[in-house]
Amino acid sequence: MNIAIAGAGGWGTALAVLLKDNGHNVTLWGHDPAHLARIEDTHKNEEYLPGITISGAIDLSPDLEETCAAADLVVVAVPSKAFRDVSSRLAFFDGTIVSVTKGIEYMTGLTMCGILAETCPRACHASLSGPTLALEVARGMPSAIVAASRDISTAQRVQHAFHCSTLRVYTCSDLLGVELGGALKNVIAIGAGVCDGLGFGDNSKAALLTRAIVEIRRLGVACGAQGETFSGLSGLGDLTVTCFSRLSRNRAMGERLGKGEKLSQIQASTLTVAEGCPTARSAYHLARKLSVTTPIIDEVYRMLHEDKDVKVAVRDLMSRDSKSETAS
Amino acid sequence: MNIAIAGAGGWGTALAVLLKDNGHNVTLWGHDPAHLARIEDTHKNEEYLPGITISGAIDLSPDLEETCAAADLVVVAVPSKAFRDVSSRLAFFDGTIVSVTKGIEYMTGLTMCGILAETCPRACHASLSGPTLALEVARGMPSAIVAASRDISTAQRVQHAFHCSTLRVYTCSDLLGVELGGALKNVIAIGAGVCDGLGFGDNSKAALLTRAIVEIRRLGVACGAQGETFSGLSGLGDLTVTCFSRLSRNRAMGERLGKGEKLSQIQASTLTVAEGCPTARSAYHLARKLSVTTPIIDEVYRMLHEDKDVKVAVRDLMSRDSKSETAS
């Protein structure tokens, strides 16, 4: 299969390596020609995926439209804030587009495949999401992921393209649930990182995660997703790895917040994007709009976007008076 | 309140410290007078709870019956294999007994409160379970836990006794679900440790955990528990912390198995009990009896009790052919 990958960050590059190993013709597009030239010269993408060798058999291209016109399947792996712009340039495309970007557009409340429905109406849409730290996938560590599409044959096509001995690909028809699980978990991971930064332990994070999956499910169901999806790989699975792994960007950002750094300082010093930051804003407003109670998302939003003191935010969260476990 | 704690291991000792701080009169019983004497002399329990100072205001006693006769509330914190023996000696007790032991009796398939119903019929029974590594609770790190009892006033009495600024206690009426979640998660944690020992990453563990909670729920529901309980602190929460924390005994045992050590070697070199080992045997047989599919529990059982090669067990587990995420 001819596969184009739009986005030469860590995840796009890791998937390029995997898809090439799976026997596909792979072209990797990036918006920065200088970055592509460094990959071409060094066979590495040290900024985003350190230590991984990138086969010379992966083509590199600075021309998005040309690259995708020649592809059967396009993987969009750009930050959520660039997703509408990039996908708008693929309006002509009538193959399969797989979003591996996790976010919620602020102005519209749309997930990435919601944006694709507007920008690429001729294509089949799918999302690939799950507990898959890019570096571990690139290192061939056993991982599992979900290919979601409203159209089961599209999900199966994606499954077939990506499945290999180290990456088990499951299918799911609840596209919205898979996308919301993947997006919302990044918000919670920032909260988990704050706990780390404040010196709390694993007990605290496990309690946070347990309460968080309840509110993720509640918000997701209010948006129209199926509740059980959030117990799957893209909900619970991804939430777990993002909250506990040292490799998670969102957790790491939260840890720095917890240690007292300001958001502006953190953002100025990191190349990679912590998607939980814009998603917190989108999710907070979505919850207001749908009248859904989301105490953890709300406090992460306030820490990030209203400059609320992290200790006060955590105290406010912990002092909420719920006595029975099943009570919301 | 006069509280007796039966069992001077790590968790019993940590709870003694917490309950004393909560203003109760606390007596700690242990079966080994020499161990109690060391605690008395050093104000530490270095074998089981290193680095924590134990107030001299906590009474130490080698006499179980006398200690419990004077108590309003008894906490049983002995290994599951000693639970029936110890609780049988408290048949006279008509106050509240809280089990903090996590296990399933092999011969009967009973949880610890199931045993209490036989051994201590005059008492009110409750279980306290959740993502609470003993050392973190003793260090005052924020934690959350569930007090479960079929009788809500018993659960609330336990909640009131244990609740403090660093330990949030929720109540739950699904006693069986809380107990099974706490017991079965130890089996999975051994599997997670095996993944660590084999050099897998966090992606693998997150996928394992996500699939595991499905089979824990399935087995629990077949036993008569409520499905949603397993999404709570004693199910998902405890599973998470046990699979990811460096401090988990069961995970640590699995890691050594994954690195090639034999069970007998591991057991000979550790003082603490990894409850997942006997629980794997009980759960495996319970699943057969109830005709429940439990692929992860089965492979952990075979590694532990049938000397199955860990790499073969992991390969067998990963090659199971399920394509859709919601399929069992």
Image (tube, coloured by chain):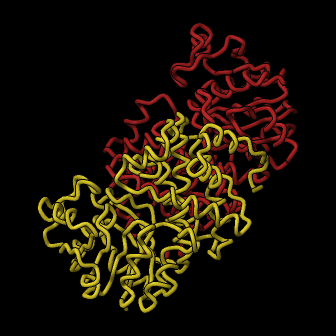
Chain colours: A red, B yellow
Using the image as rendered, state which of residue B192 and residue B41 is in the foreground: B41
Percent of width and height locating residue B178: 52, 71
Q: Quadrant of the C terminus of chain A?
A: bottom right
Among the 4 quarters of the image, the one containing residue B15: bottom left
Percent of width and height locating residue B279: 53, 61
Residue at left 47%, top 59%? B275
Residue at left 49%, top 78%? B113
Q: Quadrant of the N terminus of chain A?
A: top right
Horizontally, residue A250 falls left or right of residue A158, namely: left
Horizontally, residue A72 falls left or right of residue B27, namely: right
Residue A274 visible from this viewpoint? no
Residue at left 40%, top 46%? B246
Indicate whether B17 appears above or below B71: above
Outermost residue toward the top?
A41
Percent of width and height locating residue B254: 50, 46
- Tell me how many marks there are: 0
Indicate whether B254 appears above or below A15: below
Percent of width and height locating residue A112: 70, 43
Residue at left 47%, top 48%? B251
Among the 4 quarters of the image, the one containing residue A49: top right
Using the image as rendered, state which of residue A34 and residue A234 is in the foreground: A234
Residue B63 visible from this viewpoint? yes
Horizontally, residue A90 falls left or right of residue A47, namely: right
